Every structure is written in C-alpha cells, then in structure tokens.
Image (spheres, helix red, strand yellow):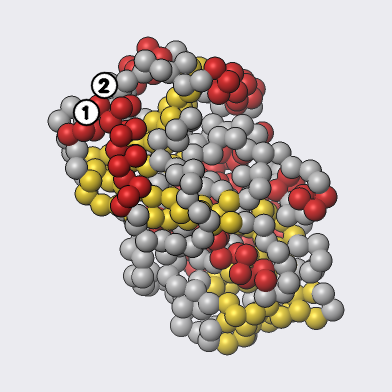
C-alpha cells in the first residue's frame, strides 16, 4: 500500500466479526453498523453493557465506507470544535487504549477563503478555535502557497491552518471499534435490517428485524441517511435529507506536490489531499437533488476538473483512476441529531451528521455512552437535541464542505 493510502471498507464484503444469531435481549440495540454505531457499541461495552449492533448490510457499507476520511477541529460552533479536539485526542490514544490503529495521520487542514465576507467569518472561527485551545493559524496567501507548492493563490484573501487536523482510515476506525466492542461483549449482526420498533405505552420494548426479534428498553438509531425511514416505523419524523457527494482519486502526475495538507476552498468547496500515489479530489454540487442515489454521475466531473486545475494547475497532468458516490445526511442547521426522542421513552438518535460523522464518531460515541449511562459526558451534546427544531432554537454550523 503506497504512502498516504488508508484502506477502505469493501462494500458488501463480510467483516468476519459478526454473530449469526440474534440474542433474545440486549441492554441497548444500536441500529446501524457504521462508524457511529460501532464507536457507541465500544464505549458502552467498555462500561460493562452488552449492546447489540444491527447492520442491514455489512459494517461500514453505508456512508462510512464512502467518506473521504478527514478529521478536523476547524468548525464554527463551540460544540463541534470541542468534538473535533476530543475525537483527535482519542484517535491518538486508540492503539494503546483499545488495541487498534485508526491510521490517524496529522497532515493538517488548510482552509482557503476567496471573499471578504468569508474571510471575516474565517477570522472569527479561528479566534474561537484558539480560545478553546486549538492551535489554528491564520495565514495570508503567500504562507498558504508555501504549504501547497504550485497552488494558485491569486484570489485567496485569507487562510487558516491546523497541523493536528488530517486523515484517518474509515475501515481501520470502524472495524477497529467493532472488534474491540466484540471483545468486550457486544454482539454484532449483519444482514439484519430492522423492520419495526416495538413500543408499549409510548416506551420502547424491543425491535423486529430480518431474522427475528430482540427485547430491549433502549434503542439508538445510528442509521445515517436511512434514519428517517427507521423513525417512520414509530411515527417519528427524523429531519434529515440525504444528498449525494462524489469522491474522485487521481493517478500520480508530473508536478504533483509532496506532503501537503487537506486543502479546502471554503467558497467553491473544492478539496484535495494525498491518497495513494495521487490525490483524492471532491467538490459539492449545489444543484444536487436530495435522495439516496449512489450511482456515479460522470457529468459532475468536468466542473470539478475545471475548478481543480484552476486551483492546482499541475492536476491537468493527472488522470482519474476511480470515483464513487456517498451520502451526506443533512439537517436544517448542519448539526447532528443526538439525544432522546421525547415522545417515545427509550428511543434515541445519533444521526444527521451533515458530512461530519466520521470525524466526530470517537467523541460522539464516548460522550453519548456517558449520557446513556447517566454519567457526565466529556463533551456536552445537549445542543444536538432532536427537539431543538420543534422548540425553535438551533445554532448553524457553517464550515461544511
């Protein structure tokens, strides 16, 4: 495996970590075997509970296995900055604490701003991050150019850089958490699509799934873009909308810059970072309709190539080796839904991460486990309460790529 290459979860491949039988009962049922569900299972099992993870396909076969693998602390809201800090601290400690390597690589994140308004917001965000203890640097365009040799910076007004941000492995983190959770007593079942949630007098009493039923008084929906469908089983409207995003990987190319950070244009959302012998490149499509379409739209590639080669001209010498599509699970304020459903006792959400689920999973899994166990969380997740839209309060995250 070449430098910069992190292994990806092969969609549809068995992980070899799973049980073939459903237990009759579980302390907690976790619906969804992506990185959020597996992280939560580990932290619950670490505290002595026996969680059950139900995955409709294979572990990590949804959004987790299709993500770009970025991890960062550069956000616009305090809770997300703190989650980024905590998640990166956990990534550093996992080899010793949990016995697996998440392939964390602190290559840094470089954020570029090309308008006066966005640059002023960037300065405010950097001030927040620094106040919370993140060593983010505010850079001018010349300093930004030094970090990415050959990058065009004529239009850059301001930039920010955090050297402890970077990349981790989607497969390494997800399968690592699942393996560690199983060693501690968690049960993981694949091909176990949930078909119903059992309730009695507005309280959860169990679940039905392909393969049987399980009694439990606590169910956490970690089903990513499918969380809306799972919620509908008990009449709960989960306010997320899935939106397709494409990821492309290039060949090596003449003039390719060497050890560069994850580089993001905040205005166009273009990003690129090292991946194997080439670069991983992506950019949001503002006209992309919502839906669960995972087919690769090759017509989305020319606009990305135009913008990518404008920002990094040497990319014109590269070829596209592969590409795939994944889903962001967007909420109205680009913030997760983490907390209880107040109308149904024992039903919780951990979904709607708006493209940030992979990078937040360690911190969210740890703190949500604390809350479920009645202990103080490391990071206060109350601002992610699913009831916030009904109650009329929310704080929008603006650093969404």
Q: Is residue 73 left or right of residue 206?
A: left
Q: Nearer the viewer, residue 39 or 9?
A: 9
* Tags 2 and 1 touching, CB below 8 Å: yes
Using the numbered discs, state the Cα–Cα distance from disc 2 to disc 1 in whole angstroms: 7 Å
Q: Is residue 310 left or right of residue 1?
A: right
Q: Residue 19: x and y, percent? A: 47, 78
Q: Does residue 316 appear in the picture of this structure?
A: yes
Identify the element where label 2 is drawn: loop
Please name the residue shown 62% across and 56% down the image: 240
Task: Give the residue at mark 1.
Answer: 314
Q: Residue 250: x and y, percent? A: 24, 43
Q: Residue 103: x and y, percent? A: 37, 46
Q: Residue furthest left?
A: 254
Identify the element where label 1 is drawn: helix
Q: Does residue 42 appear in the picture of this structure?
A: no
Please name the residue shown 45% across and 24% down the image: 112
Residue 150 image label:
2
């Amino acid at each position: 495996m070449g430098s910069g290459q992190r292994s990806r979860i092969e969609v549809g491949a068995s992980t070899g970590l799973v049980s073939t039988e459903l237990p009759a009962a579980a302390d907690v049922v976790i619906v969804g075997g992506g990185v959020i569900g597996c992280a939560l299972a580990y932290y619950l099992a670490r505290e002595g509970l026996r969680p059950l993870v139900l995955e409709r396909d294979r572990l990590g076969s949804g959004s987790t296995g299709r993500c770009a693998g970025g991890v960062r602390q550069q956000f616009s809201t305090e809770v997300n900055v703190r989650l980024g800090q905590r998640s990166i601290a956990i990534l550093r400690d996992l080899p010793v604490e949990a016995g697996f390597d998440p392939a964390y690589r602190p290559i840094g994140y470089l954020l570029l701003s090309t308008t006066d308004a966005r640059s002023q917001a960037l300065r405010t965000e950097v001030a927040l991050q620094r106040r919370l203890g993140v060593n983010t640097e505010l850079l001018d365009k010349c300093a930004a150019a030094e970090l990415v040799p050959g990058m065009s910076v004529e239009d850059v007004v301001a930039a920010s850089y955090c050297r402890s941000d970077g990349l981790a492995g989607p497969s390494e983190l997800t399968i690592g958490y699942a393996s560690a959770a199983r060693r501690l007593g968690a049960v993981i079942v694949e091909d176990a699509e949930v078909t119903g949630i059992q309730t009695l007098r507005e309280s959860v009493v169990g679940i039905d799934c392909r393969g049987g039923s399980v009694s439990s008084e606590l169910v956490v929906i970690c089903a990513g873009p499918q969380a809306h469908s799972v919620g509908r089983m008990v009449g709960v409207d989960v306010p997320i909308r899935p939106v397709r995003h494409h990821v492309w990987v290039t060949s090596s190319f003449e003039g390719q810059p060497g050890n560069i950070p994850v580089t993001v244009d905040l205005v166009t959302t273009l990003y690129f970072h090292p991946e194997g012998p080439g670069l991983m490149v992506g950019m949001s499509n503002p006209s992309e309709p919502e839906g669960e379409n995972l087919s690769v739209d090759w017509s989305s590639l020319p606009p990305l190539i135009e913008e990518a080669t404008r920002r990094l001209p040497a990319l014109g010498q590269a070829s596209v080796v592969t590409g795939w599509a994944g889903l962001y699970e967007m909420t109205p304020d680009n913030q997760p839904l983490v907390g209880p459903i107040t109308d149904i006792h024992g039903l919780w959400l951990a979904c709607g991460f708006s493209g940030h689920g992979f990078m937040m999973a360690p911190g969210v899994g740890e703190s949500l486990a604390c809350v479920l166990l009645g202990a103080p969380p490391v990071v206060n997740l109350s601002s992610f309460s699913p009831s916030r839209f009904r109650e009329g309060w929310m704080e929008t995250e603006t650093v969404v790529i």
